[in-house]
Amino acid sequence: MRRYITLLFAALTLCSCVKNETEQSEPLVDVTPVNLAGVWMLTSFDGGATLQESDYVYICFDRSDRTYTIYQNIGTMYCEVKSGRYFVETDPMLGAVIRGNYGTDEYNFFDWSHRYIVELRSTTMRWTATDDRQNVSVYTRVDALPEGLQ
């Protein structure tokens, strides 16, 4: 289980130090459950690296009950699905911070390994770990999950 958690968060939060032009040109929007709602695809990590063609990570945010579902196949040929709750807070020094936990049962959950500063734009979002500013992931909004993941 610990290996899975490490692989999942490695995929979600590896370092990305290069902002693309689209990201820089779009204005920031408030980080709220309404603005986060929808499907996001991991597009950049580790200094601007992208996933291998056959790999994917999608995160779907539901605004009504503040839950999320992650679909990913990093380190495996099968789709792994994890879900839980997320929380958006405002830190006076950092701005919008997202945190969450896995699981929807109060007796069967554990917290994410990091909290993340979120820079949200209409089509992209950047997550930077609060405790490791080199740990950055960039996501792009997509219309829907690919067929077969739904």
Image: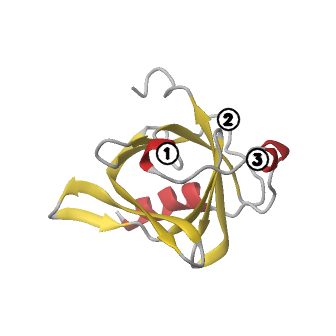
Separation of residues labelled 3 and 2 (CA atoms): 22 Å
Question: Would you say residue 72 is visible in this rendering?
Answer: no
Q: Estimate how packed mark 3 is, as few (under 14), some (14 to 19) or many (20 or more) residues with alpha carbons within 10 Å.
A: some
Secondary element at tag 1: helix
- Please give left or right for residue 41 compared with residue 105 in the image: right
Which tag is nearer the camera, tag 2 or tag 1? 1
Residue labelled with disc 2: 53
On screen, residue 109 above or below 62 = below
x and y percentages locating residue 59 in the rendered image: 48, 43
Residue labelled with disc 1: 36
Q: Quarter of the image holding residue 132?
A: bottom right
Q: Give whichever of discs 1 and 3 has the lower sequence position.
A: 3
Q: Residue furthest top?
A: 147
On screen, residue 4 above or below 121 = below
x and y percentages locating residue 101 in the rendered image: 34, 62
Q: Residue at x 51, y 61 (%)?
A: 9
Q: Amino acid at mark 3?
A: Glu
Q: Residue at x 43, y 22 (%)?
A: 148
Which tag is nearer the camera, tag 3 or tag 2? 3
Report the coloring of the rendering.
secondary structure
Tag 3–tag 2 contact (CB < 8 Å): no
Question: Would you say residue 10 is visible in this rendering?
Answer: yes
Q: Quarter of the image holding residue 2?
A: bottom left
Residue labelled with disc 3: 23
Secondary element at tag 2: loop
